[in-house]
């Protein structure tokens, strides 16, 4: 393991906004994010597979009346968002280091008010379908964690994942689905608040359009 990565892991241990194995709150956070971490009743918004946390930090700046939690297993990536949030003095953003499939160990039913999936790994191989973050097993989990009328957002450069997601949503009772194959040239352009990730910029430079959808579970 490189020296820089080790330094970032050490900083994550020190940073108050990184919740990970070895910290007391990591094993005791389920159902307690409002009362013990944020100490308010503001809505909790998740960015899943958040990587460097550009959206978690960006949205936290725009919406101080909401709480944001970026979730990822890559500690070196979380360090970036964590450090930036501290530098900006943001108290309404945190980062949870865990696998997405374990979310129910860290959040109680109906504890979450919104979910963002920003350029998740498309997992193009059919054998990896169950690992796609819009596979039915993940959608079922989101449904349990989300409050009534909460939105799920997906933003991706990958057409295959986007169309797969639209197909999977046909198996669920949903409402208020809107989508576009070219976010930046659509009436939904304001939906991403001008926040662009490192990967998004790279794919746009290659000529890829950004696909976007949002929906609510109907029941």
Image (cartoon, rainbow, N blue to C red):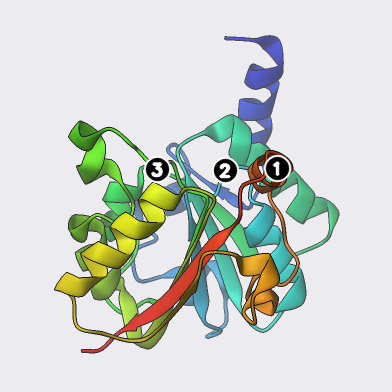
Which residue has dot 2 on it? 51
> Percent x, y for residue 77?
61, 36
Which residue has dot 1 on it? 198
The number of discs equals 3
> Percent x, y for residue 115?
45, 69
Q: Residue at x 18, y 57 (%)?
A: 137
Compare residues 189 and 147 and report the one nearer the observer.
Answer: 189
Is residue 198 toward the left or the right of residue 209 in the image? right
> Percent x, y for residue 208?
61, 47
**Residues at marks 2 and 1 touching, judged by CB atoms closer than 8 Å:** yes
Q: Is residue 44 above or below residue 117?
A: below
Is residue 161 toward the left or the right of residue 53 in the image? left
Please rate how many residues cluster around mark 2, counting C-alpha atoms within 10 Å: few if below 14, some from 14 to 19, many from 20: many
Q: Is residue 62 above or below residue 19?
A: below
Quadrant location, the C terminus: bottom left
Please rate how many residues cluster around mark 3, counting C-alpha atoms within 10 Å: few if below 14, some from 14 to 19, many from 20: many
> Percent x, y for residue 194?
75, 67
* SS type, badge 1: helix
Please rate how many residues cluster around mark 1, counting C-alpha atoms within 10 Å: few if below 14, some from 14 to 19, many from 20: few
**Distance from label 2 to label 3 (Cα)?**
14 Å
Q: Residue at x 27, y 32 (%)?
A: 125
Q: Is residue 185 above or below residue 25?
A: below
Which of the two discs, 3 and 1, labels the residue nearer the N terminus? 3
Is residue 130 toward the left or the right of residue 22 in the image? left
In the figure, residue 178 lies in which quadrant?
bottom left
* SS type, badge 2: loop
**Residues at marks 3 and 1 touching, judged by CB atoms closer than 8 Å:** no
Compare residues 9 and 53 and report the one nearer the observer.
Answer: 53
Which residue has dot 3 on it? 122
Can I make out residue 114 in this image?
Answer: no
């Amino acid at each position: 393991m490189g020296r820089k990565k080790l330094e970032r892991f050490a900083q994550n241990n020190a940073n108050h906004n990184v919740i990970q194995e070895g910290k007391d709150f990591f094993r005791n956070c389920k159902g307690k994010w409002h009362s013990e971490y944020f100490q308010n009743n503001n809505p909790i918004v998740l960015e899943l597979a958040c990587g460097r946390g550009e959206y978690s930090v960006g949205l936290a700046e725009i919406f101080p009346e909401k709480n944001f939690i970026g979730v990822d297993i890559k500690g070196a990536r979380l360090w970036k968002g964590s450090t930036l949030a501290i530098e900006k003095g943001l108290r309404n953003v945190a980062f949870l280091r865990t696998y997405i499939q374990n979310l129910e160990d860290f959040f109680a039913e109906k504890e979450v008010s919104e979910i963002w999936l920003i350029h998740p790994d498309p997992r193009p191989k059919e054998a990896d379908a169950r690992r796609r973050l819009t596979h039915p097993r993940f959608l079922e989990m989101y449904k349990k964690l989300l409050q009534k009328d909460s939105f799920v957002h997906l933003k991706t450069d990958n057409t295959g994942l986007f169309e797969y997601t639209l197909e999977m949503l046909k198996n669920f009772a949903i409402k208020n689905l809107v989508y576009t194959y070219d976010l930046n040239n659509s009436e939904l352009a304001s939906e991403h608040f001008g926040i662009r990730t490192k990967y998004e910029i790279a794919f746009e430079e290659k000529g890829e359009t950004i696909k976007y959808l949002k929906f609510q579970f109907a029941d």
